[in-house]
Image: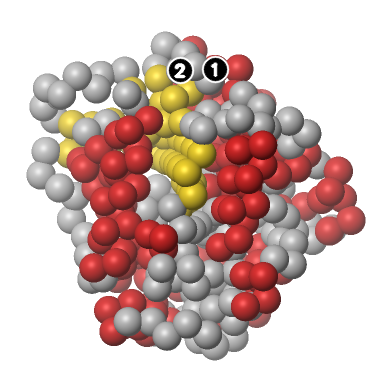
Amino acid sequence: MTVLDAQMQIFVDQSLSFYPADAIDASVAQQRQWYNALCKGFAAPLPNGIGFKDDTIVAQGGHPVPIRRYQHQSQTNGTEGIHIVFIHGGGFVVGDLNSHHDICGQLANDTGFDLVAVDYRLAPEHQYPDDINDCLSVVDNLLQTGQKMILVGDSAGGTLSACVANARKSYVGTQLLGQVLIYPALNRGVDTPSMTEHAFAPLLSKDDMDYYLPIRVGGDRSIIASLGGNYMPMQTLDYSGLPATHLFPAQVDPLRDDCEIYAQALRDANVEVTNHLAMGQGLVHCYLRARNMSDKAAANFEAICTAIKGLAK
């Protein structure tokens, strides 16, 4: 196991203090309670000049999807009409508009773009394809009103962002400017070297992945391979035409190698892609929350914002 520096070890220790050792065996309601407490414990105030308001988008079947719009109170940098669409992580089970509130506010502030955060339906109460349909409904609403967008997601949100890109790549070159995927699951939990090397990594383990991956389909692993690129990004049959992509894996993470496998598939399809593996050295899954206490995480967050800004050029 890679030895973490002192700053990252403090972040890991503080994160683990919110959970008992057997947390994965707890009820979903209890897991959400612990996760919400963790998010609140690391939350920072929004930057000055960033406002927000809650809204809803009507999804397929009439379901209202809650969203949160982060807006610059003084828009003077020429970025009108370009939005970040942020899809949160949480294993498809936990997370909401509050869990990543400060992260979204800082992304909006540091990139100069307005941001729309999506509160998609969670498993196990809601099963696939409810989650991706909610995300697509929000994206389609922005597309229909002429907005340009950059997809950004962390962990399970990175998975969903890449699935959105699979489904809406006809807008690449016009309105879908790119995607930035932060420690995402992309490859259906295959036994990569990182899945073995970091099977017991802090904050995300192989056992966690074995729990989260099938929960969207009632635990029935037998049907996953047939669900296609709207369920897992690398189940698409065609990578050509996907948007320019930036990948930000964490080194100490069973999902680390998903990014390089995906990046190679995009390179083979002549899609512009950068895997920022070097930026993730010494970092663990969920490092976005460590950006205010870890120099490495802060540098990574800055690189993420630079990548987002570069996609708009």
**Residue 175 badge:** 2
Asked if residue 180 can be seen in this view, the reply is yes
Horizontally, residue 127 falls left or right of residue 298, namely right
Tell me the residue that label 1 is attached to: 171
Say what secondary structure mark 2 lies in: loop
Residue 215: x percent and y percent?
Answer: 71, 59
Residue 108 or 78: which is nearer the viewer? 78
Q: Residues within 10 Å of mark 2 (few under 14, many from 20)?
A: some
Residue 89 or 260: which is nearer the viewer? 260
The residue depicted at 57 percent of the width and 53 percent of the height is 259
The residue depicted at 32 percent of the width and 33 percent of the height is 310
Q: Separation of disc 2 and disc 1 at Cα?
A: 5 Å
Horizontally, residue 291 falls left or right of residue 213, namely left
**Residue 271 badge:** none
Residue 231: x percent and y percent?
Answer: 71, 43
Horizontally, residue 149 falls left or right of residue 215, namely left
Is mark 2 in CB contact (under 8 Å) with mark 1? yes
